[in-house]
Image: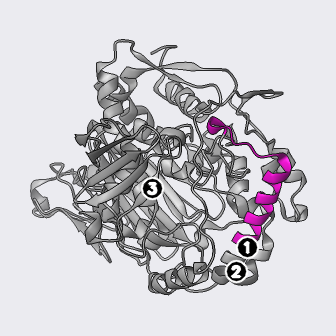
Amino acid sequence: MSGTDTAPLRCEPHPISGAIYQALGDGLVRVEDKAKGKWGVFRHDGTWIEGDLTYADRHLLGYVGGPDLPPGRDVLWTIMPALEQDLAGWVAAQRAAGEGRPQRPRIIAKYTNDPGMDTADGPRSSAHVPQEFFLANDRRPDLLPPVYHKTAPVPGGPEKVPAVRYFERKYHDLEVERIWKRCWQMVCREDDIPEVGDYHLYKIASLQYLVVRTAPDEIRAFENVCLHRGRQLRDCSGKRATEFRCAYHGWQWNIDGSLRVIPAEWDFKGVRDDVSRLPEAKVAVWGGFVFINPDPAAMAFEEYAGPEMLAHYAKIKLQNRYKQADVTKVVRANWKLVQEAFLESYHALATHPQLLLQGSECADIRFDNFGNWSRLGHVGVSGACPHRGMALSKEQALDIYHQTADFMRETLRGMIGDEVEQYSDAELNDQGFNNLFPNASPWGGWARVVYNFRPNGDNPDEALMRVMFLAPWPEGREKPAPAPQRFLGADDSWTDAPELVSFAKIFDQDCGNLPLVHNGLKAKRDPHVWMSGYQESIIRAFHHNYARRLHLEEGE
């Protein structure tokens, strides 16, 4: 899909070199570096075509000249309207409001490297502003949940992680036995199965479960396997089932898992007791999500998640939101590699150069780990770019913090009304991309975004990345029907899901790295990767949990 098919051709300066990247259509980009007196034409995948400039930033080439969104879709997900039918009018109003106003300048600055700074908690970026500074200056401190004051940085410095964890079959098989059969994992939204008999088919590695609403206030989960000869009972999700009948020989179970019919049961004397119930997994409902755990001895979900996670999300009531978008894409990389791309913001400088044009490289992100739950970036502001010598004073940062809270308060007022008055500045600023081990990432605050990562079937070399948007919705008002799930193949662009708006192009940049990382790890002579002390500390925490769950020895 070329730029000429969808929207005006993009043109952006590079945030460090200042070279101009101009889309030509048909996936081509002209790059002109006036400072060097050179130019070149490239395909959006980085392939040089002509000119004396022979190398360009692959990620900015893709952003400018790669698959694009339809007109009116390149908007921020955090402030877009909740309803699809309101989007066109909202975009028109935004454009009208911007007419006659000076355009926000694109910020170009040379690379200088971040010198960092020492703090009482250890080394931090030179852009660091202590979390407590913002919380101490919250204008509605009486509304601030105490959990926002808790801190739990991951101890230690840089660590090595064995590269084989990402591709050797041994680790995939151990994950099935010790993670996917034993950990709580996100399956769907309650709203996906609203009626009795509605069911969601959940696949994880070689395992399959039918998650079914068996009563108005009850959800259960059963192995999706006929107890006769092992055929899958259902091969897709469905609505209003009254039984699960095997299409091979016709054995039937009720939706509560109890046996209904064995055809020619006279030929199976004494078998009924052994097949009277489908094997069951534990089910928990939290924040409008349905979780399952196949381990009959598993601890309660609330204990697994921990008090900090439950307290952090308590006020924002994720159960009140409705599913505005739901997209799953195949990525040719191990699921852990894919998830780890979204457990740090260190990559923003290189992978998302267009973000730097607004002055932010996400260098001052707060990271905390509370057992199975990690909290990322929940208090702070954007605007500093220390790798280009751009800093904010604490006073400037606080001013942006208050402005952002005011903007979000009024934006949300149009969606949830005066309910917005229940929230402090910190909660309105919260954009934390949090993670519950092993693979569920509902963001904090009002960011709408939910991630989920898992193997693509029984294949350690491919992952399924699922993205949901949960739109704000007033408490007590009937919600719209949840968006149906869209599925994208490995060669599809995220922009084929325009409901993800501007996030789609960001995901294309992220996922463009991952197959190259996966293949690179297989070719790497040194069989380890490095994780930094702070900016990649949540990945370190994940691997601490991972090694403990898989019973791995040190360095294994």
Which residue sits at x=39%, y=21%? 163
Q: How is the image coloured?
A: one colour
Which residue sits at x=36%, y=70%? 8
Of the numbered discs 3 and 2, the one sitting upstream in the chain is 3
Dot 1: few (<14), some (14–19), or many (≥20) neighbours within 10 Å? many
Where the N terminus falls, by quadrant? bottom left
Tag 2: amino acid:
Arg
Q: Is residue 518 above or below residue 413?
A: above
Gap between marks 3 and 2 measured at Cα: 34 Å
Q: Is residue 107 above or below residue 516?
A: below
The boundaries of the magenta stretch are 386-408
Dot 3: few (<14), some (14–19), or many (≥20) neighbours within 10 Å? some
Tag 3: amino acid:
Glu
Q: Are marks 2 and 1 in contact (CB under 8 Å)?
A: yes
Residue placed most toward the observer, 43 or 407: 43
Gap between marks 3 and 1 measured at Cα: 31 Å
Q: Which residue is mark 3?
A: 12
Q: Which residue is mark 1?
A: 409
Of the numbered discs 3 and 1, the one sitting upstream in the chain is 3
Q: Is residue 166 above or below residue 107?
A: above
Residue 323 percent across, percent down from the top left: 48, 71
Dot 2: few (<14), some (14–19), or many (≥20) neighbours within 10 Å? some
Which residue sits at x=39%, y=25%? 165
Residue 152 percent across, percent down from the top left: 74, 36
